Image: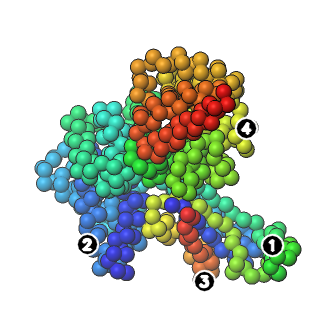
Amino acid sequence: MRFIMIVKATKDSEAGLMPSQELLDAMAKYNEELARAGVLVAAEGLHPSSVAIRISYPEPGRKPKVVDGPFSESKELIAGFTLIEVKSKEEAIEWAMRMPDPARLSGKGKSSCVRCLKRRN
Amino acid sequence: MKESAVHRTIDGIWRIESARIIAGLARMVRDVGLAEDLAQDALIIALERWPETGIPDNPGAWLMITAKRRAIDHLRRNKLRDRKYEELGWEIDRQHEPDWDAAINDPVGDDLLRLIFTTCHPVLSAEARVALTLRLLGGLTTEEIASAFLVPEATVAQRIVRAKRTLAATHVPFELPPKAELTARVSSVLEVIYLMFNEGYAASSGGSWIRPMLCDEALRLGRVLAEITPHEPEVHGLVALMEIQSSRFRARVSQSGEPILLMDQNRALWDHLLIRRGLAAIERAERLGRAFGPYLIQALIAACHARARTSSETDWVRISALYDALSQVAPSPVVDLNHAVALSMAFGPEVGLEVVDALQQEPSLKNYHLLPSVRGDFLVKLGRKQEACEEFKRAAALARNEKERELLLSRASECAASCGETKPNN
């Protein structure tokens, strides 16, 4: 089964600030561990929403609306994702728990990293 | 947390940690069978304790330390007074707080690699290698392995017990193979992984067309191997082949469970992420700049299909040339049969038919359903429906997979029907 682990955007990621070296190192190590366990399918980081586009359908059946970023509702934005292929939901949870926690590493209050697990098929 | 929830969590942890733990223990006790027993002991202790104590922060290290302690008890009980025992005893007695990280520290994956080479050792039968590898490296239960191969659990259990006994009796060392043997030993490992994959991909018997668990397991093991042996081109070749073949899962079975042949598949359903991974693995292999082995060539063939946006864009001339290359490095009548198919696509069915007719007397293909099936296909294209019908019937009688048999019978009756339609007009 495939699961996606979504990292939510933060003020820092939206401002285009690079994560700390410590976090980058921890993420690199984590991704390497996923690869060596044979479960990593893809991992990507996203640009801030300032270069994003949103397409919405305000009226059913009418022309869609194309709006350029940035978008203010950072709760709805994602900063990156990791796709893994594992045997069970529990294995996915276990991997997600091991993902480096940006909040803990930067010491900035509550966690900004939400590990959302979603079944594919 | 409820006990059942804790047990499921432990399953997840076991899946991630078991191979590393068994590998680390095997290095200590120099016996893969004993290593697994010790790891299982630790797992049982965890299953008993964790529902009460909660799951420790570093569960992998906890399991490893617990198993290691059992190993030392075991070595002491057996009064093994060799140097290894003394070193280990000294280490544990002096440390009040065990070094959690060092316990599962295997930075270059050597222990894991040793374990793979051991479970895929040529002294074991192919069946035994597959079962033992799934069990020790995949962390699968005997029950799961049995259901994947549609055999009774007792059969698998016995295979595993015997395999462990053989390894012990023949004194297979828990070591990386010497350089001179490396290529041969790597191909023994690849053979096991590919056997596993194929068993899942084209389930040779039974009602289901694909048994995905075996494919997933084989692909995962292949990816692990590619990370720890990055300099072996055939490892990347096999990974590429499996990634690309896996990309077709969603497209190769219809809603009603009927198999869909490659040329008829909806290519939008292919998993393009896996195709990209497959192509990347081919590049990794090519960058090593060594001779192309059979897995890499097969991956290159699979890549030709993967790159074609529609079936009519398939580069059959290149595929024919690749089959030619494949028959040089790994000659086999089955490869010749595939070559015939490629030739017919590139240069016409009569060219393919010529090759297939030359294979008719090949003893190893006598019971191979694809020979009459392919011949039937060429005959249909040449308009020789009556003969084609006979070939499809012959193929159906030889096919071991029920779904495949149904497909062949329906092709036979299509041919028969179109003969019936055209006859009155003749």
Chain for mark 4? B
Asked if residue B151 is positioned above or below residue B423 in the image, the reply reads below
Distance from Cα at disc 1 to Cα at disc 2 = 51 Å
Distance from Cα at disc 4 to Cα at disc 2 = 60 Å
- For the residues carrying marks 1 and 4, which lies nearer the camera in this image? 4
Residue at 32 percent of width and 67 percent of height: B97
Q: How crowded is mark 2: few (under 14 residues within 10 Å), some or many (20 or more)?
A: few
Please tell me if label 4 and label 2 are on a single chain. Answer: yes
Distance from Cα at disc 1 to Cα at disc 4 = 37 Å
Q: What residue type is labelled 1?
A: Arg
- For the residues carrying marks 4 and 2, which lies nearer the camera in this image? 4
Residue named by callout 4: B312
* Left or right: B108, with B251 as reference point: left
Q: Do the residues labelled 4 and 2 touch (CB within 8 Å)?
A: no
Q: Residues within 10 Å of mark 3 (few under 14, many from 20)?
A: few
Q: Can residue B380 be seen in this view?
A: no
Chain for mark 3? A
Distance from Cα at disc 3 to Cα at disc 4 = 58 Å
